[in-house]
Amino acid sequence: MKKVAVACQGGGMHAAFEVGVLTEILNDVQAQKFELVGLSGTSAGALCALLVWYGLAPKNGSQGSAADARKQLNDFWDNFVAKTGAENVLNLLTYGAFKAEETEIPVLGINAPLFAGSLNPYGALYQAVAACLPHLGVRSEYFDLGDLLKKACPALDPNNPQIDWSNVKTRLLIGASEVVNGFETVFDSRVNKNPQYQNKGMQPNHKAAFWRQLLPLTLDGVAASGTLPTFREAQQITGDGNYWDGLYSQNPPVREFFYPHITLPERPEELWIIRINPQQWPMVPESNADVLDRENELMGNLSLNKELDFIMMVNKWSQNSHYGTFGNDHPHVTVRTIKMEQDTADDLQYSSKFDRSEAFMDRLRKEGKKVARGWLNLWPNNVGEYPEDAAWP
C-alpha cells in the first residue's frame, strides 16, 4: 500500500474541518486503501493529530485501530466545545469580544476598544477568573487543556505509561516554540522509540544542528503546541524549557519525515496537507478586521510553505542524474493539499478561530467530511499536487 503522512495545520476552532477530513481518512485506512505512516500537527492541528495517533497506537489491553482513532478524535472534540450553559455564556463572551473588535466605525476606520486579549494570563485578575470557573459550571476540560489531554490520553501518563512503543507503526510530530532560547521544537514519537535521536538544540557538544530540536512526545509537549500567550502561561517542561504555540515555528512540522536517517520503510511516499489557513485571499484586505485575518493566515502558512518548497527542490535534485545516487536516498515525495471550499474559507474570520460553539464546529466538521470524501474518491489519479492544488480553480 502507498505510505501516506497527514499534516494538520493549526488555526483554532477552524481545525474542526480537520476533524471531518481525518474521520474520512480513517475510514479509508480501515478499508486498507493506503498505509498511514505519519501524522503531524501544530496547535489545534496537534490535538487532531495526537488523537488519531493515540487511537492507532497499541496500548496495554488494546491493539489500536482506525475505528479506535476515529472515536477518540470525535469524542475529544465533542468535549472540547462549549456544552454547558455556563460554557456557552463564556464562549459568547470570549468569541463575542474578538468579534466586537472586528467592528469598525464606518468612514472613520476605528475599531471597537481592544479588550479581548487584554487579560494577562500571569495576572491576578486572570487567575481569579480561572479559579471561579468550576464554581460557575464550567468543566475543567473546557478551560484546562492539560486536564483534557490527561483524561483523553491516559496511556501517555508519565507516571503510568501504557504505550507499546516497540509496536507503534505511525509516527507523530508535534510543533512548538521554545520562547527563551528560540528553539524550533518538534515533539517526536520516534524519539520515544529511539532515544538516541533526541536533540536538545545547540548543546555545547555540538550534537544539535542549528536552532531546532527533537524531543520525546509528551502530553506537556502537545499542550505546549497549543499555548497561545494571550490565553495560557508558557508551558514549562522540566529540563527542556518554556513553550508557546507552534504557530511561531512550524505549522505544522513536515521536513522531519524526510531526514536522512529515516529509513525508506518509514518514509512517506505521499504527504497530505490539511490546510485551514487559505493560501489565497479574494481581494486586498482594507478593513482592520480583514487585515488582522489575512495577517494571521499568512503567518500560519509561512513556515509550511518554506518546508514544502524545499521538498519540491529535493524532488528536482532526486530526478537529476547530475547528482548521482542522491535520488536513491531521497526518493520523490508527492505532496497534496486538502482544503476548505472557497466560499467557506472566505467567510471565516480571525475571530471565528475562537468560536467554540457546537453548531459552528459541527458545520466545519461536516464540510471536512464532505470535502475529504470527494477528494479520497478521486485519489490517487484524479487529484492535484502541490503547489498547484494549494489554489482554488
Image (tube, rainbow, N blue to C red):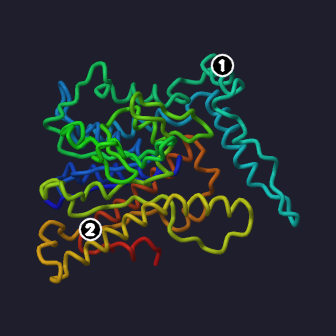
**Residue corresponding to mark 2:** 379
Q: Residue at x 67, y 39 (%)?
A: 94
Q: On the image, numbered disc 1 is attached to which residue?
A: 132
Quadrant containing the N terminus is bottom left
Residue 219 located left or right of residue 378: right
In the picture provided, is 61 more to the left or to the right than 340? Answer: left
Q: Amino acid at mark 1?
A: Cys
Q: Earlier in the sequence, mark 2 or mark 1?
A: 1
User: Residue drawn 33% across and 73% down?
Assistant: 385
79 on left or right of 343 = left
Asked if residue 366 is positioned above or below residue 188 in the image, the reply reads: below
* Rendered position, 323 above or below 271: below
Q: How far apart in space, not on screen, are marks 2 and 1 (Cα)?
A: 50 Å
Type of the residue with mark 2:
Trp
Residue at image position (26%, 69%) is: 334
Residue 296, x across and y down, in percent: 59, 58
